[in-house]
Image (spheres, coloured by chain):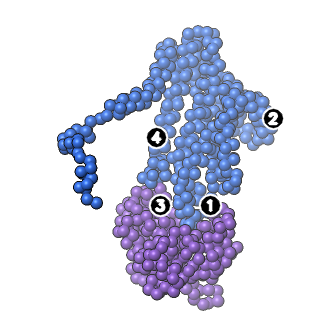
Amino acid sequence: MTDVPAASLEPEVVPRPTAEERWRALRTVSRGDVVYRSLLTLLTLCLPAVLLVIALELLVAALPGIRAMGLSFLVHSEWDAVHDRFGALPLIVGTVYSSAIALVIAVPLALACAVFLTEFAPRWLRQPVATLIELLAAVPSVIYGLWGIFVLIPLLRDHLWPVVKPVLHWLPIFSGVFYGPSMLAAGVILAIMILPYIAAVTREVLLAVPPAQREAGLALGATRWETVWTVILPYGRAGIMGAVILGLGRALGETMAVTMVIGNNHQVALSVLKPGYTIASVIANEFAESVTRLQVSSLFYVGLVLFVITLVVNALARFLVWRVARGSGVGSTAL
Amino acid sequence: MSAAPKPRPAIVPAPPRTRVTPGGTVRVIGTLLATNYSFWYGPNQALHDITVEAKPNAVTALIGPSGCGKSTFLRSINRLQELSPRTRHTGDIAFDGESVFARSVDPVELRRRIGMVFQRPNPFPKSVFDNVAYGPRVTGAARERDLPRIVERALTHAALWDEVKDRLDDLGTSLSGGQQQRLCIARALAHEPEVLLMDEPCSALDPIATQKIEELIVDLKREYTIVLVTHNMQQAARVSDYTGFFFLGRLVEFGTTQQIFTSPRDERTEAYITGRFG
């Protein structure tokens, strides 16, 4: 255990660094680090740059339309390519309305799925069903559209509507004749499309709730249902909100399936039975066949509007998540 | 039905809680008695013929090495363990003479009368007030306007009131570890339970917080039946009146704490308390 033999076996050839040298070595940054760091910084900055470039491109392409119509574009309903008169109000309303219908249908279903799969379902059933629900997200959009045309619309129109009509017909949102392609059909298709996202993310969130929280609720005399309602869902509410926003983002931008079932009609109607139009659909339908410069620019303009709507929704959602994060597991001091 | 909630001062030792039976006899309540209780996880037997009693106004400590079934037994008492899949049991655990497994017993009502404190503090990410008020609220046992009184009493009982009375709106999770555990104790006390089950309540705490909880346990036994699972033999010796030694799913020895720690009858008990294994 003495260090004399060790010292004699390995004589110090290199003089020990002085305190100053050591200090300098500690302070110098290795060249590799510098390169690596700048590379990563560059790559990271690329992403926001892409966002900015897209916004800029949209803006530039939309400029002729903005110059010609200004903000009145947003409040007019006409869409007349022959006379070069364009208004985006039905598109904006249709986009928001169909997404809202989708959320109203999908959120309760998705939450119910997630709660059932994490809390109540027999264990052997949980994983297979969860996987099947996630598979819904893998179905191509156009297939949903076809299914909507050939299955969903006839189902709604010929079987469901005649049954519920006497009860609901007096409501303004269910007024008018139901021909099939409609805001309702679009909303239901969207609901089915966003459900797997909301359900899958919510399920992950609920699985991440610590078992100790669940047991605390049960041990205090709450039933399983009360534990879900008063402990588990509140604990995960920031994450659940995030899941809903993810779904909303998908719904706002969804194009193909919606185009196939919404009826593509430039009108603002309160009734969900009436056909409508969405921003994404009009761009998909008209871009290739635009004749006038103003029409192309109008499409860019309305695309810019969609961009802004999505940004605003996301910002709002972030604010909401931040607000509710107090008192939920995610984002509180508990984690 | 259950004992009428009456305010109990924290300082004066309360007399044992009693209930007048329909026959007119006065009986002390809060007695737990397990007889030949065995428990299986799937094919694995975790508990073998446990027969043990926990008396009111006393702390019963369950000691033993990890994985010997102490927690399983504790969690069987308030029927939390049976929520795990593929479990079964034989034998019985009686609470005040009535089997906790009886068909007429609602586990939810049972858990209201048998409070539990867990290994790690697990306050809800709600305010301090809402944490304590959770039980009475969710079971509908108290009216909203009575809650401030109930919360104050429970926090006072848990020796936490003075530290949090000005921050009842803060998140329970923002308190220190020791305070969180006392908050969890207060949460369990808000129901006025008859029994308090404690599953290694100090294992995640520093020595000072541990000392506070131990003082609290001694304090609380004046009013409650306390069953304490602990790894810490000094803790068992300090706070408990009776001690049971669990080993490999069996209750090897049970007796007064003094007897177990000074003159154990079983050589395995002696080996364990002298630190030769576990």
- Asked whether the beta carbons under mark 2 and mark 1 sit within 8 Å of each other, the answer is no
Residue ID for mark 2: A158
- Asked whether the beta carbons under mark 4 and mark 2 sit within 8 Å of each other, the answer is no
Q: Nearer the viewer, mark 4 or mark 1?
A: 1
Observer-nearest of A252 and B98:
B98
Work out whether B16 lies above or below A253. below
Q: Earlier in the sequence, mark 2 or mark 1?
A: 2
Q: Which mark is residue A224?
A: 1
Amino acid carrying mark 2 in the image = Asp
The chain letter of the blue chain reads: A
- Asked whether the beta carbons under mark 3 and mark 1 sit within 8 Å of each other, the answer is no
| Cα separation between marks 4 and 1 | 31 Å
| Cα separation between marks 3 and 4 | 26 Å
Q: Nearer the viewer, mark 2 or mark 1?
A: 1
| Cα separation between marks 2 and 1 | 40 Å
SS under mark 2:
helix
Residue ID for mark 3: B123
Amino acid carrying mark 1 in the image = Arg
Q: Is residue A330 visible?
A: yes
